[in-house]
Image (cartoon, helix red, strand yellow):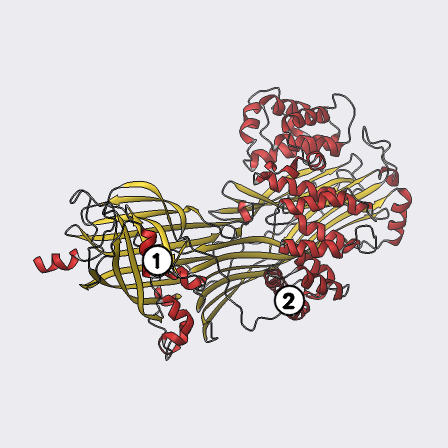
Amino acid sequence: MILLAVLFLCFISSYSASVKGHTTGLSLNNDRLYKLTYSTEVFLDRGKGKQQDSVGYRISSNVDVILLWRNPDGDDDQLIQITMKDVNVENVNEHRGEKSIFKGKNPPKIIRKENLEALQRPVLLHLVHGKVKEFYSYPNEPVAIENLKRGLASLFQMQLSSGTTNEVDISGDCKVTYQAHQDKVTKIKALDSCKIERSGFTTSNQVLGVTSKATSVTTYKIEDSFVIAVFAEETHAFRMNFLQTIAGNIISKQKLELKTTEAGPRLIPGKQVAAIIKAVDSEYRALPIVGQDFQSKCKGCSSLAEQWQSTRKHLQPDQLSKAEAVRSFLAFIQRLRTAKREEILQILKAENKEVLPQLVDAVTSAQTSDSLDAILDFLDFKSDSSIILQERFLYACGFASHPDEELLRALISKFKGSFGSNDIRETVMIIIGALVRKLCQNEGCKLKVSANPISCIIYLNIFEQVKKTLNRIYHQNRKVHEKTVRTTAATIILNNNPSYMEVKNILLSIGDLPKEMNKYMLAVVQDILRFEMPASKMVRRVLKEMVAHNYDRFSKSGSSSAYTGYVERAPHSASTYSLDILYSGSGILRRSNLNIFQYIGKAHLHSSQVVIEAQGLEALIAATPDEGEENLDSYAGMSAILFDVQLRPVTFFNGYSDLMSKMLSASGDPVSVVKGLILLIDHSQELQLQSGLKANMDVQGGLAIDISGAMEFSLWYRESKTRVKNRVALAIIGSITVDSSFVKAGLEISAETEAGLEFISTVQFSQYPFLVCMQMDKDGVPFRQFETKYERLSTGRGYVSRRRKESLIAGSEFPLHQENSDMCKVVFAPEPESSSGGWF
């Protein structure tokens, strides 16, 4: 036992403050050389805890530590030298065998000779009260190599008493908590508190966002009051909220153990640490112990123009219904984010008109200063010859995943200028409003540019005053309004925490409204109760009063309707659709409104809304217009919301002559509401691991979308039909990588699908009550999932493993509220089922 105590006495022998009373952290004995072993290893997996399914690598070495200097005025002020020796790199997956990328390669070949020499040059660590005061190394060493030495040096920082404090190490300035026990000290680092400069961004909406979690625990093993080993484990996990199969883990471990001690050099005398360092080697420089960022050089990577040539074939108009188009779109965005303005501008100017709109989508979605400068230089808003490109740019701005002040300032500047198209000017106004809304959701309203009068006018946040106005509109306190305006006002009130009197006044109005409006408002109230919407509790409370809840009020007939149902429902998420249709008293469609919402917990996303509206058509069937609608011009049009962004409305016809022209041509051709490629999910984190390795965690998701609508009107058959068609191709890619500059490991998980949703509403008004058929169909959906794991040396040698699973989700028809309808029968399909089996 005496021999064992002597051996451990000579380690990083941290005398406990309670035992010796003069040290608070690690302390080395004089004139000793400490021989230790060190290893750091990293695993990447999907969170299933199976090492044989992981990829990664281990860096190991021997470590020599000596005490160079101790302040004669206090034992808690020390300068130590740390030297890595006999460095080796190997697989962490013992099942790799002959497939190991390290097999047959020695460390100089793997790490490279110049890197290995730098890694094995010693560093100096100045410790005061157990905490790092300065980190000294040689200048101009490769950053990635220096980070590995920082990772080892950071393990020497600790304290022997319990408590919470802030420490600066390779992870940054972090909050740490120590828990001291008799045989160990545990240090828990709150990684989310670490202040370190690293790039990153995320999608503001939680439905499309990513949940990540990070932990760091370091244990100092103590025996006979001395520290004999250090074990550290750090984990980073991510999971996409919307699709939880897109997930991954990074597990990083460090182990430092004392093996033996020998006689070492004598202490260097002196009182000033600066003089001691100069005496050791004047080349040493004080450097931050905080990890420094680096970018690995890409050997053999294609230029932007070369990658575009391989990408553009997938972005031809006839290819946009395929998920491969979205994958190519996402990959090209990643390349654009490293490109310069001149490179981007060159490919924009060289592209033809068929593929150019898709290229504009990608360049705008890159959201870098260079890409924004390039696209603004390319587009001429004073010209009306490139309206499609201008509109694609503006909508891509509206869908921006992480908009900033620079983008908003650029659009405001454009808005002040002249336009070749008034439609584009209106779209700029709409998109500025969408951007201000996003910025305000992320506390960006504090930005000076958000106080610009234009953006303030566009984005109003004065809802209490707005609700008073909405109540006046619905109840027509000052003037008569159209049904569409009144019902919209009522819906907004009921969807935004209505008061008791607001609900009561709306219920009391039912019975005194125009016939179809009576039926519509009754359907809205019943839908709120049936679907248990937030306002249902208040509605039930009001309905306890007989004056509001009676047969006369709740027996109104008509064809207008409102219905809400589930597209999908899972324990952690839900997708809902709602359809409401309002007719005029003469049976002509006034408005149809189709909405799809996605919910994750309390967060929601307005995925889409398509509103088709018509007016002034009563003269065609010699009918009498409803009150307040006697002098309306003939009109039909469509507006849409896509992923919380309002799109510019489109017009089917405007005026009687335009209507007659459309009816005589009888084409019924659909009108495009929105078409293009959208970067929908965009999450990127650059992580500094405690071991010194660099990690990245990225999730990108995009879709190719085509929403179109059409309205057909037949006087001969006295029938109207509206059709809204949604076609999308979706791809989501999640990846994690860990890079040491000489070896890289990665895991990519992805999913893709092509889907369609169609809504058709047909009304025959040759008799009363009208015959109504409402259909909403979801096509069968192929769903493909992929997993790719790899390890790759900087010299080019690599290991890749790929797996795939494909399933088919059955198509389905969704129940819609129908009354007095003998013209169609809805056949309900069973709940969608996915094919079973596979590794996911």
Picture quadrant of residue 428:
top right
Q: Which sits earlier in the primary sequence, circle 1 or circle 2?
A: 1
Residue sitting nearer the eye, 834 or 207: 207
* Residue nearer the viewer, 831 or 339: 339
Res. 376 visible in picture: yes
Residue at figure coordinates x 64%, y 34% from the top left:
524
Q: Mark 1 highlights which residue?
A: 278
**Where's the N terminus, which quadrant?**
bottom left
Q: Provide the residue designation for mark 2.
A: 304
- Residue at (66, 39) in percent of width and height: 449
Vertical placement of 449 versus 70: above or below?
above
Q: Label 2: how many residues lie within 10 Å, few (<14), some (14-19) or many (20+)?
A: some
Amino acid at circle 2:
Leu
- Give the image location of residue 528, x and y in percent: 59, 34
Image height of 248 relative to 492, above or below: below
Q: Position of residue 44 (x, y in %)?
A: 41, 62
Disc 1 marks which amino acid?
Lys
Q: Is residue 177 above or below residue 749?
A: above
